[in-house]
Structures are given as structure tokens and as C-alpha cells.
Amino acid sequence: MQSRTPPPPSGRFAWASRNFRIQTAATVVSGLGNAGAPIATAFAILDGGGSTADVGYVTAARLLPTVLLLVIGGALADRLPRHHVMVGANLFSAVSQGALALLVLTGEPTLWQLMLFSAGAGAGYAFYSPASGGMILESVTPEHAARAFSVYRMGFNGAQIGGAALGGALTAAVGAGWVLALDAACFLAAAALRFLLEPQAPSAPAEGGGMLRDLREGWHEFSSRRWLWVIVLQFSVLVACVSAVEAVYGPAVAKDRLGGARDWGLAMAAYGVGLVATGVLMVRWQPRRILLVGNWGVFLFGVPALALAVSAPLPVLCAAMFLSGVGVTVFGVNWMIALQQEIPAEAFSRVAAYDELGSLSLAPLGTALAGPAADLLGLSGALWTCAVVSLVLSAAVLLEPQVRRLSRRPAEPPADLLPEPVAAQ
């Protein structure tokens, strides 16, 4: 089993190890660029005369390599030093986003070029994400997991606020190409920070085993827990709907009915405020029924689709995005606690990869069909459909008893605090 980095001995953030601090800082840096990049890409297409369907195709091209490569990324992250995997993935994403930025800045890129380099960013994420989750898991002790996951998400979500607002403003002021260039620079800076991480020993491969055996073992850990695959099945459809709303329909509504990239950037920033504000709450709130409470947050995921469907003014849309951010953090923190509590550390990256693979499996199809669905149902009809599906799925998953009943376990005291055994007289 992989060893977790022990926390520093004293101080206000004594529970936060060096690796945790570096990984959180790097996540903030890369998040600043990543939050603005989807806005820039969408408006690069729309302002260049592209259609809503074109935005969906480019988004699908980014998601498809992620879906196809996630399990390989998870297996590598459980075999190799995770910080090496993350650094390599960040450098690859920097090159991909830099090339995309150059295309946008120097001319009018064709649809296939946008799809190709967006796919590169998706491939980089497929290798980064499982390693990142494993690194955070091994950087803190279980008794501080809730606080650590909350603080980590607060850092990431704070970057979403600044990145979305900055990305929308810069796209409107200087053009999408410079926002994409900023994203590439942020990936480079994040790679440099992650290079400073202290390596953790990778899991020793089983004798006679290879990557296929690793994947089979990871699948067993995933499929043997009904609460896990039921929620992932829920998210496979839910994420497809949310991706269509945020990546395709939201920018289209903003361009047609609101103030364009600037207003959509403000709406995404409001979403980030909801993420961060709830992160502060989750530092102290430790509900016993972790998945039941987490799924109540999922009910808020469809609120932005409702606001867009009824052509709500910008303040109402921002309030809806704020509530969605609240829901994402409530679910996300409780989900990470459930995974850390229930999944062996040596298999965590593989299980996380299967989790994300299942959750994203329909997202490329959802975004690719977003444009045709809007043509068939009308933009408001497509948004209503996404909202209703999100609400129905949130209710349906509560029919599974394991989801309702999975409870937080009390943290075990550190070994050095346990009483000495009494010698026999």
C-alpha cells in the first residue's frame, strides 16, 4: 500500500503536508487558465461565423480522448510516481493549447483544426486527473480528509471565479487567442510547480501482472460497490446534460440574448463563487450520511438550465449559477470522502479513472448532439429537457439503499496517540 505523506508537526495548517500545499497551488494556477479556455473557444467559433452545432462538435472532440484514455491514465498513475504523470500531462496540454492559441491569433482556424487541438487538451486531462486525485489522497491523513478536500476545492474553485471572469473579459477585450495563450502559460507554470512535489513510491505491480491485470483489479474494486457504480451511472447522463448547457447552450444564449462573452464570464464566475462559499461551509460541516447529503446537492445542477430556458436576466442567471456551484461542492467533498474511506489507496487512481470514465462517457455524445437537439426542440426546449432530466436523475438515485445509508466512519486516532498496552501481571 502506498504511504501517505505525514503532516507537518505544528502550525495552523499542520494537517497540510508539503505535497498538499504544492498540489493545491498548482491546481489554482492551472485552474485560472482552464476556466477561461472553454469560454474563449466557444466565442472563437461563434464570432468566426460558426454555429451552435460547431461549438458542440469541438467540445465533443475535447471530451472524447478523455473518455478513451482515462483508464490507461489511472493504471499509469497507480504504477508510476504520480507527480511525473502530472508534469508530463501538463506539458502536453501546454503544447496543445499553445498551438490552438497560435491558430486563433494568426488567422481563422478551420473546424477540424479546432477539434484536433481541443482533443489534445482532452488527452492531457485523461492522464492528469487520476494522478491528481491519488496525490491529494496520499497527501493527507484520513482524520483531516474533509478539511483537506474542502480547502483543495476552495482553491480550485477560487481559480474558477477569477479565471472565468478574466477569460470572459479578455475574450471580449482582446480576443479568444490571448485567453488560450494564457491557458498554455498556466499549464507550464503548473508543471513547474508539480516538478517540486516529493515523489511517493508507486504501487508494486503484482508478480506476473501487467497493465491489463491492473485494470481488471481496478474494475473489481469499482464494480463490487453498488453505491459507486449507481452514482457514476447517474452522472453519465447528468454530465452530458450539464456539459451541453455550460459549453454549448450557455454561450449561445449569452451571444443572442445577453452581452456576449463578458456576461457569460460573469455567470461562470458566479458559479465559482458558489463553489468557494460552500467550500468554507464544508470545512466544518461533517454530515454522517455522506452520499445522501451529497446527492441533495445534485438537485441544484439543473437550475442554470431552467434559468436559461426562461430567458432569465443576467442577475437571475448568476444566482442560478451560484446555486449550481453550491451543489457541486456539497456533492464533490462528500464524494471524495466516500472514495477515500472506501477505496484502498493502492487502487485509488484506477477506481477514480473508472469513476470519471463512466461519468464522462456520454458527454461527447451530449455535446455533439446539443446543436441538432436545439434545432429540433428549439433552444428553450433543449434546455428544459436538460433541466428535467437532471431533476429526475437526482431523485432516482436515492432509490438505492447503499446511497442513502453509506455513513462517515469515525477517524481512527494516530498510532502514536494510542495508549500503551498494559503488561500482564
Image (tube, helix red, strand yellow):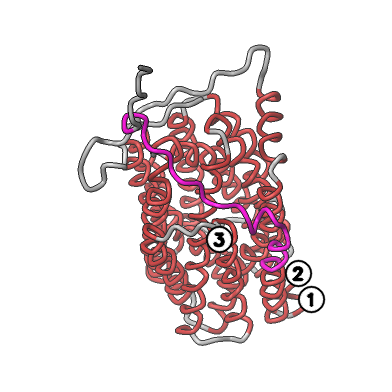
Residue located 45% across and 29% down the image: 84
Q: CA distance from mark 1 to mark 2?
A: 6 Å
In the displayed image of the protein, which residue is found farthest to the left? Answer: 11
Which residue is label 1 attached to?
376
Q: Secondary structure at mark 1?
A: helix
Q: How many C-alpha atoms fall within 10 Å of the one at disc 3: few (<14), some, or many (≥20)?
A: many
Give SS at disc 2: helix
Which mark is on residue 372? 2
Distance from Cα at disc 3 to Cα at disc 1: 34 Å
Q: Few, some or many C-alpha atoms within 10 Å of disc 2 (few <14, some 14-19, many ≥20)? A: some
Question: Do callouts 1 and 2 mark residues in contact (Cβ within 8 Å)?
Answer: yes
Mark in front: 3 vs 1: 3
Between label 3 and label 2, give the one nearer the viewer. Answer: 3
Depth check: 3 or 406 in front? Answer: 406
x and y percentages locating residue 38 in the rendered image: 52, 60
Please tell me the numbered disc located at residue 294: 3
Extreme-top residue of the structure: 208
Q: Earlier in the sequence, mark 3 or mark 2?
A: 3
Magenta residues, start to end: 393-417
Total numbered labels placed on residues in the image: 3
Q: CA distance from mark 3 to mark 2?
A: 33 Å
Dividing the image into 4 quarters, which one contains the C terminus? top left
Residue 37 counted in the magenta span: no
